[in-house]
């Protein structure tokens, strides 16, 4: 497979199966987020609800793009992702995948709505930090991206809580029908209008869950492919090398119009580094009409150069805007950004079969294992049972929050956003006393310890596996 020796081929197959297993577990671990309300309110039978949710998770992954997936890939330092040491690569993949699977299974077993997003990201953070102990450069993670991800994970539950409270207050003022605010009967199907709202919001959550959480699985598989088979996946071989060279030539022409004399010392160093990387890539691509004609090492060298070049150009733009030293005009900056976007398409991509594989894994997983967490969300977060209005409000807010986050390329936790939304709806109905604090504390503890536990376990596993390989 892909020209690998039998040993690496076996490692690749095991890693791909394990990544699909993670996404399968993610599906049944997070299913309750989409189906809790629709099942709890008797709007759909459990079997129909989870199949329906599975279908829309599948569609969400397939249509959701790859912005979040690339955010996951870019968390790791390029040196680790393209490390030529097989032991490093195997240790990286073992630590990330095994930690993610074990923690997801454990929290699901105890019925805790814990975040698969936190689990995967914590595992990646742990490996990156552990790598810094043995790396000559000491680079652990892409800290700029880590900051964005952590901020999104922190703010999204607060948004879920606050917006759901506000939405509930608005519903009470606008909607006069008391049936919407009633607790669901355990035997009766809700009125058609209410049932339609619950099913619609549940469908939206399923779709957005697929478009965000599914992309994490896509990112995980791309980490596997780029690490183990860089010759085939470090660059997008479906695109023409000549077009990449054309982008590089245009970028060089734009860069050369900048007067570096006006730059500070730091910007000038970045400027010359960008020019050096452009020259290197141009040299490797000259007279190349097929990426297969590149030498093995050149595939990941071009990837490294593109990542470094993009980072330095962004830092130049950010610094000169902050300092109000406009040596780069808006028109020139726009032209540079256009070429960088075109260049990034060669490293920020995913083959169609990867998206299909994750779509199927998440969709099938969604059809299994929903019951324990449904009970937690429906009955144990609040002192009172979840009403139709609370279910609808929390699901709509969660879906919109996740949808916007996916468009921004930020991974968020469906579990956190929806659970905090349910809590917000309970408070909006009867005040803070309406929360069942024992359950809330258990969920909060699971949320708080997920990152540190997965960081420590993943980092420890990485160093341990590396030691014995």
Image: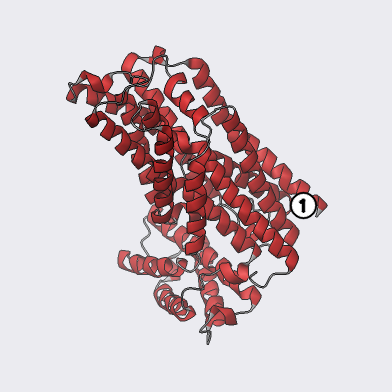
Check the image and tell me how it is coloured: secondary structure
Q: Which residue is mark 1?
A: 466
**Residue 262 at x, y percent in the picture:** 42, 66
Question: Measuring 72% from the left and 52% from the top, which residue is drawn there?
Answer: 91
Query: Neighbour class for label 1 at 10 Å: few (<14), some, many (≥20)?
Result: some
Residue 164 shows up from this direction: yes
Q: The residue tagged with tag 1: helix, strand or loop?
A: helix
Residue 214 position (above or below residue 179): below
Question: Measuring 44% from the left and 55% from the top, which residue is drawn there?
Answer: 67
Q: Residue 329 lies in what quarter of the image?
A: bottom left
Q: Quadrant of the N terminus?
A: bottom right
Question: Measuring 36% from the left and 61% from the top, which residue is drawn there?
Answer: 326
Residue 271 position (above or below residue 380): below
**Residue 87 at x, y percent in the picture:** 75, 58
Q: Quadrant of the C terminus?
A: bottom right
Q: Is residue 164 left or right of residue 301?
A: left
Q: Residue furthest bottom?
A: 287
Q: Is residue 458 left or right of residue 59?
A: right
How many numbered badges does the structure rendering display? 1
Q: Residue 206 lies in what quarter of the image?
A: top left
**Residue 314 at x, y percent in the picture:** 45, 60
């Amino acid at each position: 497979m892909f020209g690998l020796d039998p040993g690496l081929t076996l490692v690749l197959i095991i890693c791909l199966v394990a990544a699909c297993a993670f996404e399968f577990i993610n599906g049944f671990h997070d299913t309750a987020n989409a189906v809790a309300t629709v099942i709890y309110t008797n709007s759909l039978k459990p079997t129909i609800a989870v199949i329906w949710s599975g279908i829309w998770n599948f569609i969400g992954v397939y249509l959701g793009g790859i912005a979040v997936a690339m955010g996951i890939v870019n968390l790791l330092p390029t040196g680790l992702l393209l490390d030529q040491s097989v032991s490093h690569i195997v240790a990286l993949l073992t630590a990330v995948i095994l930690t993610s699977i074990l923690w997801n299974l454990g929290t699901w077993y105890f019925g805790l709505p814990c975040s698969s997003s936190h689990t995967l990201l914590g595992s990646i953070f742990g490996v990156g930090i552990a790598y810094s102990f043995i790396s000559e450069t000491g680079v652990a993670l892409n800290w700029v991206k880590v900051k964005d991800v952590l901020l999104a994970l922190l703010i999204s539950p607060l948004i879920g809580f606050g917006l759901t409270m506000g939405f509930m207050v608005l519903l009470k003022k606008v909607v006069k029908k008391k049936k919407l605010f009633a607790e669901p009967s355990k035997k009766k199907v809700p009125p058609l209008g209410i049932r339609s709202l619950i099913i619609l919001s549940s469908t939206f959550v399923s779709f957005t869950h697929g478009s965000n959480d599914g992309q994490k699985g896509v990112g995980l598989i791309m980490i596997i492919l780029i690490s183990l088979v860089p010759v085939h996946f470090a660059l997008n071989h479906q695109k023409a090398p000549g077009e990449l060279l054309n982008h590089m030539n245009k970028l060089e022409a734009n860069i050369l119009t900048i007067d570096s004399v006006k730059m500070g010392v730091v910007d000038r160093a970045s400027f010359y580094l960008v020019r050096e990387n452009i020259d290197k890539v141009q040299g490797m691509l000259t007279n190349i009409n097929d990426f297969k004609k590149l030498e093995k090492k050149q595939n990941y060298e071009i990837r490294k150069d593109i990542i470094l070049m993009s980072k330095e150009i962004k830092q130049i733009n950010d610094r000169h805007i902050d300092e109000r030293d406009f040596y780069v005009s808006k028109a020139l900056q726009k032209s540079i950004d256009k070429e960088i976007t075109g260049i990034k398409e060669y490293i920020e991509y995913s083959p169609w079969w990867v998206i299909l594989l994750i779509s199927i894994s998440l969709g099938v997983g969604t059809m299994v294992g929903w019951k324990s967490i449904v009970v937690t969300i429906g009955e144990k977060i609040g002192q009172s049972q979840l009403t139709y209005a609370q279910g609808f409000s929390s699901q709509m807010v969660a879906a919109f929050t996740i949808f916007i986050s996916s468009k921004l390329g930020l991974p968020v936790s469906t579990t956190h956003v929806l659970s905090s939304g349910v809590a917000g709806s309970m408070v909006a109905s009867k005040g803070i006393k309406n929360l069942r604090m024992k359950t809330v504390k258990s969920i909060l503890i699971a949320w708080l310890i997920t990152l540190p536990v997965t960081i420590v376990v993943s980092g420890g596993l990485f160093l341990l596996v590396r030691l014995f390989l």
